[in-house]
Amino acid sequence: MKKFRNTREMITRLGPKYLSGKTLIVNPKKVLKYRDILLGCSSELLDEARGLALGSVENVVFLETIEHMRDYQSFVIKIRELLKTKGKCICSAPFLIPRHEEDDYWRFTVEGLCEVFKKNGFRINEADYYGQFYTTIEEIIRFSWFGHEVKNKWVLRFVRAMLKISNFFDKRVKNKNVYTNIYVVAEKI
């Protein structure tokens, strides 16, 4: 299976493959960056989900969100309730990323997050990890030294250089045990 370098590449490839119809996008701060990729999908923000009828949504996308849910099992159950039968869910979560916000509770392996979805009435269509060893090191340095968002142009240049170097090495050195993120594409059954 092709490994994605980052979340943007993951949703760029998986969005058109799995999503069609009404899509609930959870965590607007993160996902708004990817809205251009999700063209053709009408979106609702989480606050608007309160007004949605149960079983009325074809898709739910939540990227790097589930780790911020204190009770992620209940969160997945609520997502399932909103989805129509055979509705799709694309979820990504960190594996080896430093704590990046106050309400940052969990980290997941591919197998662990698949179990969360299976136990709550989903079939797994696709699941894997992305972000290789050197990308993980780059993200740990970036989060630890500069925080979640980099705004200084010189720091941004340094971070981009680190990313290019990490991508270079990741293409040459394969490691299945160290990676930044995971994703799951699940279908309500």
Image (tube, rainbow, N blue to C red):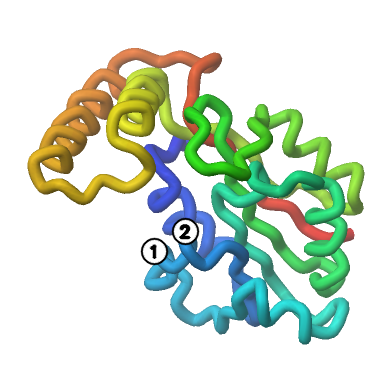
In terms of image quadrants, where is residue 85? bottom right
Camera-nearest residue between 173 and 98:
98
The total number of labels drawn is: 2
Q: Judge whether 25 appears above or below 109 on screen.
A: below
Q: Residues within 10 Å of mark 2 (few under 14, many from 20)?
A: some
Q: Residue at x 36, y 27 (%)?
A: 144
Q: Please, what secondary structure does the residue beneath circle 2 have?
A: helix
Query: Measuring 39% from the left and 25% from the top, which residue is drawn there?
Result: 140
Q: Dots 2 and 1: beta carbons under 8 Å?
A: yes
Look at the image and tell me whether residue 16 can be seen: no
Query: Mark 2 — residue?
Result: 30
What is the residue that sits farthest to the front in this orientation?
A: 102
On the question of residue 127 being in view, the answer is: yes
Mark 1 element type: helix
Mark 1 residue type: Lys
Query: Disc 1 designates what residue?
Result: 33
Could you tell me residue 74's position as x and y percent? 86, 53
- Residue 172 placement (x, y as % from top left): 29, 16
Where on the picture, by quarter, is residue 170?
A: top left
Nearer-the-camera pick, 57 or 21: 57
Give the answer, above or below, for where 51 lies relative to 178: below
Left or right: 104 with respect to 11? right
- Residue 44 in the image, given as x and y percentages of width and height: 61, 80
Q: Which mark is residue 152?
A: none
The one nearer the camera, 110 or 51, is 51
Q: Is residue 55 left or right of residue 153?
A: right
Name which residue lies at 40% across and 19% down: 133
The residues bearing labels 2 and 1 have C-alpha atoms spaced at a distance of 6 Å
User: What amino acid does circle 2 point to?
Assistant: Lys
